[in-house]
Image (cartoon, rainbow, N blue to C red):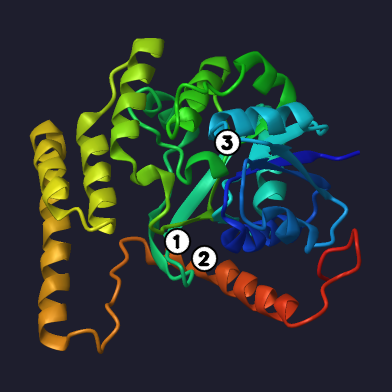
Amino acid sequence: MVEVSVVVPTHNRSSLLTLTLQSVLWQRDVDLEVVVVDDGSTDDTAEAVAGLRDARVRIVRHPTPQGVAAARNRGAAEATAEWITFLDDDDLWGPDKLARQLQAAREAGRSWAYTGAVSVDDDLKVLGGRPPPSPERMVELLPRYDAVPGGGSNVVVHHHTLAKAGRFDSRLRNTEDWEMWIRLAKLGPPAWVCSPLVAKRAHGRNSSLDTREILAGSALIERLHGSKMDRGITYRWLAESCLRTGRRATAVRYFARAAVHGQARNVADDFGVILRRRIRRHLFGDRRPEPVSYRYPEWVAEARAWLDVLTARAAHVSGTDGDKEGQGPS
């Protein structure tokens, strides 16, 4: 009996998808299936999935792109397990992520669970992260902003509860996960695992960089649920997204809006970090790596431990002929 169905929507990201799927197939102490929903890809996604040679993975395809919400809905409809979870095609999981979430949900008698996360760069260097809010606090925060770290790559939900909550709203392009968590919270509080078991890869093709869609989606969520988003937190997050894509003038405008909406102290801290980085570049150029100052070093160290193992195992597999069909690495 399969315990968990893992739904992975993907579109033209075969270069990232392989490691993402390996982090799923290396989950410990859980029986799972993986439903990859190819949302109209034109690259070698199908070949990359087939190259894993693992009978637990199957792929379904949309002939033309329909969006991540529709892809998640298709995967959930194809799922056969008691529990369902979602993973974006560019994110990664720690090896005990699913087993620990299921244990937490069962022990708490709850039908959905979340965990913690870190953000990483292309080389899987940890950029930052912090412990998530407690379940009770999570329920309070969700109407204001997406307090579940790691976006759509975090939550595990019982299939009956997901059926009650309904389908992902296809009108939302990159806030559909947040809106779903709000619906789940209305059905009951979650369980949690307070460990960094999700790694969200930051790169230039993240859908979260589309600031217009985020603001439009937030406005729709406010109308749907009669809630009011925390604009200070949202504007600060948008400013950081703009900085990653070099839109400095737009970032400054969002930082200013965040400060006006109650985030002045955090914005001041952000500018302090930016200033130190610019001074370092001026003094040392590009010859020295930029240090990262972590507010939660133990949290980051815990994530680094499993990311290092994942990187080493992936390198080993890429240098071999792979495993026999239906078997993961030993």
Left or right of residue 26, residue 140 in this image:
left
> Residue beneath label 3, please?
65
Q: Assign the C terminus to one quadrant of the image.
A: bottom right
Which secondary structure, mark 1?
Answer: helix
**Residue 104 in view in this figure:** no
Left or right of residue 90, residue 23 in this image:
right
Q: CA distance from mark 2 to mark 1?
A: 5 Å
Q: Assign the N terminus to one quadrant of the image.
A: top right
Q: CA distance from mark 2 to mark 3?
A: 37 Å
**Residue 241 in view in this figure:** yes
Q: Nearer the viewer, mark 2 or mark 3?
A: 3
> Residue beneath label 2, please?
302
Above or below for 286 versus 159: below
Crowding at mark 2 (Cα within 10 Å: few <14, some 14-19, many 20+): some
Tag 2: residue type?
A: Glu
Residue occupying image coordinates x 67% and y 58%? 44
> Residue beneath label 1, please?
299
Residues at badges 2 and 3 in contact (C-beta under 8 Å)?
no
Q: Position of residue 105 (x, y in %)?
A: 67, 35
Tag 3: residue type?
A: Pro
